[in-house]
Amino acid sequence: MFRDLLGVGNTESKVISFVGAGGKTTALFSLSQELNHTKRLITTTTAIYQPTPSLWDTMVIRPNYLNTLEDKGVKTNTVTVWGRLLSPEQKLLGVSTDCLTEVVRTALFDTILIEADGSKRKPIKAPAEHEPVIPAESTTVVGVIGLSSLNKPINNQWVHRVEEFADLVHANSGDPIQPEHLVRLINDPRGLFKGAPSKAKKILLLNQADHESDKIQGSKIIEKLKQQNAGIEKFVLTSFNPATFKLVWGELL
């Protein structure tokens, strides 16, 4: 199960932030479905597309909803989705970290899952100056990269924030993305885990390992990071079915 790969159980209280590109939303909702014996809150500090009703029980759209929840409480084994506003594009706009901190302190939820940056549905990205927005209370930060980016050109079709990415990985626009570029993106303080709280557990999720060649490349990247002592607690290779938010293949390396 995906929660076992991440080392996340069904009982302990936790705040998990997802950053990067190439499957954040899929991974987040897959984990939510597996934590089905907990009270879960799903939210964002940036923006996410409104999830389908089958994935949640309650949706709250307001900057701060504590009064709403304190009035009626939160039922066990339920999913609450929270956004500040719903945009005309049907995106839930992010809540402030101050409001989120208040919710964390109430301990209303067993698990809080946060999408902490955007990627325009590209498999790889570099953070902007203002992101990611990772709450200080995060106990785990999951950094996601889509392996479908390998050997693709550094351009707007495959990369979110091309100029920033090229600068981070020491490449030029148009160059093919190589494993060493992913290693640099992961290791650089301005890269994948930028802004992660010092006490948070860091998990690298190399997603879209849909073919044997992807698994081989992903394993090589992970071995290189282990040699460099990158400060990452877990390295996970995964493949999902995004339509159903189900893990179809996963391995802990």
Image (spheres, rainbow, N blue to C red):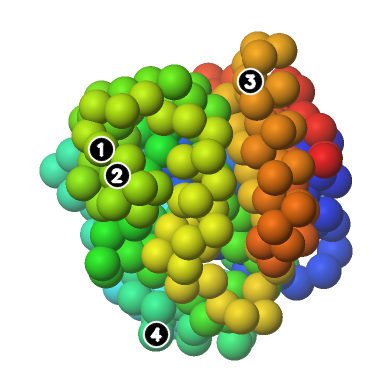
Judging depth in this view, the residue of 174 and 193 nearest the camera is: 174
Report the amino acid beneath label 2: Ala
Q: Do the residues labelled 1 and 2 touch (CB within 8 Å)?
A: yes
Residue 58 spot, x, y in % from top left: 50, 53
- Judge whether 97 appears above or below 18 on screen: below
CA separation in Å, label 1 and label 2:
5 Å
Report the amino acid beneath label 4: Asp
Instruction: Identify residue for label 4.
Output: 98
Which residue is at 65% across, 38% downward?
221
Residue 74 spot, x, y in % from top left: 62, 67
- Judge whether 63 appears above or below 53 on screen: below
Residue 51 image-quadrant placement: top left
Of marks 3 and 4, the one in the foreground: 3
Instruction: Identify residue for label 3.
Output: 214
CA separation in Å, label 4 and label 2:
33 Å
| Mark seen at residue 185 | none
Instruction: Kindly state the secondary structure of the residue where label 1 is placed.
Output: loop
Q: Can residue 136 be seen in this view?
A: yes
Instruction: Identify residue for label 2.
Output: 166
- Judge whether 42 appears above or below 215 on screen: below
**What is the quadrant of the C terminus in the image?**
top right
Of marks 4 and 2, the one in the foreground: 2
Q: How crowded is mark 4: few (under 14 residues within 10 Å), some or many (20 or more)?
A: few
Residue 125 spot, x, y in % from top left: 36, 44
- Judge whether 60 appears above or below 103 on screen: above
Q: Residues within 10 Å of mark 3 (few under 14, many from 20)?
A: many
Judging depth in this view, the residue of 142 and 81 nearest the camera is: 142
User: Considering only order in the chain, which callout, 2 or 1, is on the residue closer to the N terminus?
Assistant: 2
Report the amino acid beneath label 1: Asn
Relative to 83, 172 lies left or right: left
Residue 156 image-quadrant placement: top left
| Mark seen at residue 172 | 1
